[in-house]
Structures are given as C-alpha cells and as structure tokens.
Amino acid sequence: MLKKLKKLFLHNNLIAQLPSELACLEHLREFSLEWFMYMLPPMPKVLRESKGQAVIDRIKQFCRTAQQCSFSEFVIYFHQIPVNEVNKVIFGPKKRTLVHQICINAHPHLLQDLMSKRS
C-alpha cells in the first residue's frame, strides 16, 4: 500500500466507487475527484491546503465507516440524507436536482450507481 502518498488525482475517470484503503493514506494532502462538484456547496475538482485537507479527512472517515465507498453512499454521507431523498438536493440558482446535474455533467457512471442504490 502507498501509505506515504501525498497526492492522488482521480478526476477524468469513470470512478463510481473509491477503494476503502483510501482511509489509510495518512499523508494525503492533495486529492481530486469529480464527485466534489456534487457537494453543497460544490467544491473544486482538486482539494488542497487547509480547507481541502478538512474535506480530505472527512472523505477518509467516510471510507472507514461506509459499507461501500460508492458515489451514492458519498452523497448520502455528505448530505446527511436518506437514499430516497437524494434527488431533493438542489444546486444553484436554477434549482437543478442531483440527477439533473449528473446528466448535465455527462457522468452516466454516477447516475447508474445512484439509480442502483435506489432500487
């Protein structure tokens, strides 16, 4: 395992699930993932420095506690909502739902993960 890894860039990939071993990356200081745009407020694609480190630490905690480190579990964890309410999360002044945002951003792998959790 790469326990001393300091930077991990996963954006621009079709990732719908994170490895739980992410929680073991004690020295991680920079992390990128498209999922951050689905947080409220939306976060930048790359997290770094003090504000980013706080979110990185929360993501590592999520990977320690979640049954799966999937996108759908990520949404439930960070928005603190039940799975049947994920589409009540509203983004921006146009009041777009999570599913709408996923479609606009052309992330069908995330939509598939989200829909599989709801069934």
Image (cartoon, grey):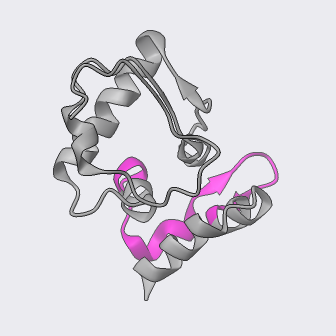
Task: Please tell me which residue is depicted at 38% across the width and 59% down the height of the picture.
Answer: 76
Furthest residue to the front? 1
Q: Is residue 59 above or below residue 55?
A: below
| Magenta-drawn stretch contains 79 | yes
**Along the line of sight, the residue nearer the viewer: 21 or 113:** 21
Task: Please tell me which residue is depicted at 49% across the width and 72% down the height of the picture.
Answer: 113
Q: Is residue 44 above or below residue 61?
A: above
Q: Is residue 29 above or below residue 93?
A: above
Residue 19 place in picture, x, y as percent: 31, 51
Task: Please tell me which residue is depicted at 38% across the width and 17% down the height of the picture.
Answer: 29
Furthest residue to the bottom? 119
Residue 27 place in picture, x, y as percent: 27, 17
Task: Please tell me which residue is depicted at 79% across the width and 46% down the height of the picture.
Answer: 93
Please state the extent of the stretch shown in magenta in the rendering: 77-98
**In terms of image quadrants, where is residue 34?**
top right
Quadrant containing the N terminus in the rendered view: top left
Residue 21 place in picture, x, y as percent: 22, 44
**Along the line of sight, the residue nearer the viewer: 79 or 21:** 21
Residue 119 place in picture, x, y as percent: 43, 89
Q: Is residue 16 above or below residue 111?
A: above
**Number of marks in the rendered image:** 0
| Magenta-drawn stretch contains 102 | no
